[in-house]
Structures are given as structure tokens and as C-alpha cells.
Amino acid sequence: MQLDPRTKLVMIVCITTLAVIYSTPGRLLLLLACTLLLLMMFRVDAGAVWGYLRPCMPLFLVLFLVQAFFVRGGAVLLAVGRVPLITGGGLAAGAGVVLRLGVVIAAAVLLTTASSRDFVLGLVQWKVPYEIAFMVSIAIRFLPVFREELINVVNAIQLRGVDLKQVPWGRKIGIYRRLFFPVVYGALIKAQQLSEAMEARGFRAYPQRTYLRRLKLNPADYVLMLSFVAATLVLVWVQIRP
Amino acid sequence: MAFLELNQVTYTYRQCGRPAVAGIDLAFDRGGITAVIGPNGSGKTTLTKLMVGILRPDAGEIRLENRPLRSYSLAGIGRRIGYVFQNPNQQLFCNTAAEEIGFGLQCLGWEQEVIGERVAFYLDYFQLASYRDVFPLHLSRGERQRLAIAAVLANEPSFLVMDEPTAGLDAYRKRLLSDYLQKVVSLGRGVVFVSHDADFVRRVATRVIGLESGRIREDSGGDRGHAA
């Protein structure tokens, strides 16, 4: 389906708004299913979606366990003596957090179905200052680069003979903690170099910019945008009404 | 028995239709310096990444010390083969140059005194002693390249794979590197390097493998090789 990138942005905003508003696992699961269906309609490869979700699995597990053990409510499912360990409310909260993050990540995969240039163009045509539009597009473009960089660093560490799978957790955390600063600082250096390169090529030389192409919203874009916004408003109202 | 053997190795990147390397048959022994040459996009870097297990072949098999490469962990490969990345930024991750060189040794549990001596030697040999406490990404391109090479050499692996090690080096530093590679080979270790530097290849390499469109075009001095 060929849609304007702005339509996709509206879809993402609507889906993530619902993900924040919903708190029950059932509704969030339904929202996740709808998001995955939408991705299938955009012919996004299921393997690619899994590729984005898989690295988050350890984080999902930690969040689930923290919520499951520390949120109290509902029937006690597991107790040590008189102390309740896991409750129905805790499990629901854990599942809710994981599903919410899953929805947000899956919705963000929609961004990969259009080029970052088109997103910039779309935002600029919506009167967003082009500096901010560029910033957003660079952030989108650099996420995979940043991920690639982390993979390279982990490969480089292992190729120096350090088996991260065998290293005890205490030392492993120490290694990762040591890596955090150089990786983040390296990213900052790259950002600085990029900004210098952009300014050297005339970025922000004039307040106005012209563009070779202009995006045009088709009737299908209007219909989808209005449908998504209307459906979201109704669902939010249903959710928050007294 | 070859130290490292590639049999009918083929690899295709997911985003690319045609194979980056196809039907590669190569064998490397410990000892000797092999240069891999070829135009941009001919599959040189892909070949080196396959040799060190960063990429897994779609077809064919790679064997290290007569065992399938896939049966080794990346760390297991790293203890036998040192790899210098094409871009030094990809392998520099410590807070100082000295820490970078000592990282592998420290993680492998070497004594602090030995680590200190080895770090001092490599800093001195690659003329990085004055940058001992400098953040690696603040160094110049050539200095980063030298540091990346030093950090890999410090582990003293049995075999070295280097992707464009002379990029960013001046003539004097290239000579230092070639001297060191000769020394490495004299200790019974093998070296494979990718290069566009014809002079360096001519001076250092005992075997030259030419790649073109992912296939072997020439292999002068090797045991096996297939012309495309």
C-alpha cells in the first residue's frame, strides 16, 4: 500500500496513544494483533518485526518479573508462608507493560516502510521547522547504525577472546558498564562530525529551503487518517469516561 | 592439514540479490603472508568476516584446525585468529589507548605485570606511548589504525586477519607494520590481509588472492584456488 509518510505518522501516534491509555492485557493484546495485521498489510516481513523485538526480550523479561513480584492486587497465586509473592494483579501488570512496549516497537516498525527523506518532507510540509524535521529523520536513520555499532563492539570484544556467555554476570555487567561511556561518547562525536559536515554543505544557511519533490495526500490518506483519529478518540473516550 | 579451510563458501547479504562471495575454495596454513586484492565490492571484507565467524556462510563450510568453524564460539575463534576491522572505530571501545591494548589480556586473566609490559611494548612499537591515556576516538585516523592493530597483536593469536591494515598509515608506519608482520610469520603464525596498496602487497605478501565479483580470479602461491 503506497501511503503518504504523514499518514503513517498519524497511525503511529494513534496506536501508541492507545497503548498508553490501555492498561489491561486483553486490550493491549488486541491492539498488538491489530498493529501486526497493519504491518502485514504494508508487507513488512514478520522476520524483520521479530528482529526488532528479539533484542528487547531480556528487558521484557526483567520488566515482567519486576511488575509480577512488586505489584499487589487480585488473587494470591503464590505465597511463602503468609507473604504473597505473586498475585493475579501483578501478573496482569507485568503482561500489560510487556505488551505495551511490544505495541510501541511494532508500531515504530512502520517508520521503516518509508524513507527518512520522505518523513522530513512530510513534516516540513506540515510546517514543522526543517531543523527539527531533520533531527527526527537523523534519529530514525541512526538507530540501525547505533545498533550495528553495538553489535560490532560486542563482536570485537568476543574476537579478543572474551566469551561473554561464559563470563559470570558480575564481570559481564562490569564489562558492559565500561563499554557504555565509550559507545555513547563515540555516538556524540559522530553527531558532532555530522553537524559540522551538514553546516559545511550549507545546512541552515538560509531560513527557507526548497525541495525538488512535494508530497501529495491522496483520498486514501485522508480517509485513513480521519478513520484512525476518529477511532482513537472514540476508544480513548470509552476508556476514560467515568 | 590446513589451519583454516574454506570449501565452496557462498554468502549473500539479505538486502542484496547477488552473492557477495560465491564458491570460494581456499586453504591457509600457519606461516606466510597472504594478500587479498580486488576492486571495491568484490567481496574482500565479506571473505574476512566469514573467516572469523562474524558472518556464517549460506552454503559451503569453513573449517578451523580441522573442526567446523560454526562449532567454535566467537571468543574461541578470537583466541586463535586476531581480526583487525576495516574501520578501526568499530573495534575501539575502551576509555584509553593503554586499556584498549590490555583489554583482551585482562579479560583472559593474565597477570597485571605481564599486561603492563606488553602494553608498554606495543604502545612503544606503534609509537603511541604519548597517547597512553588518550580516549581512542580522539586519535587521528592513522593513530586509531595503529592502536587497533596493536590491540589485536597484543593477544598474540596464531593467525591474523586484517582488513586494510595500511589505510591511514604513512610510509614509515607501513614499513614498521610490514617488519612486524615478517616477525609474526617468523614465529610460525599466518597472516591474511586485504589491501588496495599495491606497493605494500608486493613488498610483504608471499601469496596473492585476487577477487572479482565475489569469485577468485587469481591465486598465486596458494595450494588451492579456482579461477572464475
Image (cartoon, helix red, strand yellow):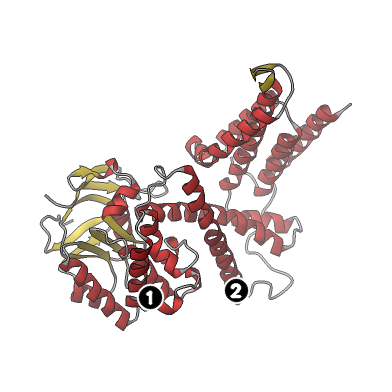
For the residues labelled 1 and 2, the Cα–Cα distance comes to: 22 Å
Assign the N terminus of chain A to one quadrant of the image: top right
Foreground of the two, B181 or B19:
B181
Q: Residue at x 73, y 29 (%)?
A: A23
* Quadrant in the rendering for residue B120: bottom left
At x 43% / y 61%, what residue is drawn? B90
Res A43 seen here: no
Q: Which residue is mark 2?
A: A196
Question: Vertical placement of B22 versus A241: above or below?
Answer: below
Query: Label 1: which residue?
Result: B168
The answer to whether marks 1 and 2 mark residues whose Cβ atoms lie closer than 8 Å is no
SS under mark 2 = helix
Where does the image place residue B11, in percent across and percent down from the top left? 31, 48
Chain at tag 2: A
Secondary structure category for the residue under label 1: loop
Q: Is residue B108 left or right of residue A229?
A: left
> Do dots 1 and 2 share one subunit?
no
Q: Position of residue A36 (x, y in %)?
A: 59, 32
Amino acid at dot 2? Glu
